[in-house]
Image: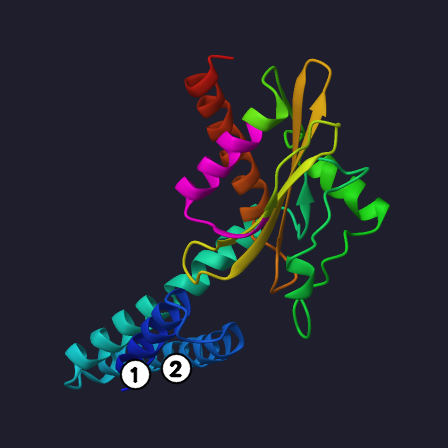
Amino acid sequence: MAGTFALPVLIIAIAGHRLGLMATGHAVAISIAAFGFAAVAFLAGLLAAAVIWRDGRLGARHAVVGLIYGLLGLAPLGWLGLQAATHPRLLDVTTDAVDPPLYRAAAFLRVGRFNSPTPPPPAERQRIRALTPEIGPRRYSVGSDLLYAVTLKRIEAAGWTLLASRPPTGDGDFGRIEAVAGSLVFGLPDDVVIRILPEPQGARIDMRNSPRWGEIDFGRGAARIRAFLDDLDAAVVETYGS
């Protein structure tokens, strides 16, 4: 019974949160409860299987069903555990560890139990930088206004929610874009800020990603920045030829 109850509850929590019908705090609490029921179902299935094996009792089918439902309910938790074990402990990843882009629109949303929008201390930023040496600023030979335009299109293509944007100006002022991206399974919100700086020979782009919830990002911050900038490289070449 616990397993057949846990899986639908977990699906409802995930779907409700991804569709915007359930607050993040409620979805997290319900998911934790569902994981608890799934664990009970799995342990009960193991105990029942052991008793059936030892005494030859009937009920093997029920034990197997309990094990299957328990495993299915615990699968997302196992995936998170695997990501935590195979990725360094990171929370706030940026291409510029010295002067990271700052959140403005997101800062008003990251209140209460959410993580602080303030960048980590310099020592922590340097630690993260050492763990993600491949994450750095990108420079392009196109103008900052053109880079800003193609960046907005890639954010739209990625399905992120745009929070705020400001194009670079002709007097050298930088452009900035803030957006929200969701995690793969639960759709937990990560804030993303992009800064586009005019340079004499083109433009430079910096990017920062940090989750609103939790103490680690399970590797998705660095992965998101890498994937987005690689995609932007291809989009700039396709659009402007350089």
The residue positioned farthest toward the front in the image shown: 170
Residue 50 picture location, percent across and down: 30, 78
227 vs 206, nearest the viewer: 206
Colour scheme of the picture: rainbow
At x 75%, y 42%, the residue is 100
Q: Main secondary structure of the magenta part?
A: helix
Crowding at mark 2 (Cα within 10 Å: few <14, some 14-19, many 20+): many
The disc placed on residue 5 is 1
At x 58%, y 46%, the residue is 221
Q: Quadrant of residue 215?
A: bottom right
Question: On the rendered image, what quadrant is the N terminus found in?
Answer: bottom left
Residue 95 picture location, percent across and down: 68, 35
Q: Is residue 91 above or below residue 93?
A: below
Type of the residue with mark 2: Phe
Q: Which residue is mark 2?
A: 37
Left or right relative to 97: residue 212:
left
Crowding at mark 1 (Cα within 10 Å: few <14, some 14-19, many 20+): some
Type of the residue with mark 1: Phe
Work out how far the residue at label 2 is from the one at label 1, CA to CA, in angstroms. Answer: 7 Å
Dot 2 lies on which element?
helix
Q: Is residue 147 above or below residue 120?
A: above
At x 66%, y 53%, the residue is 91
What span is colored magenta in the figure?
147-164
Residue 240 picture location, percent across and down: 47, 16
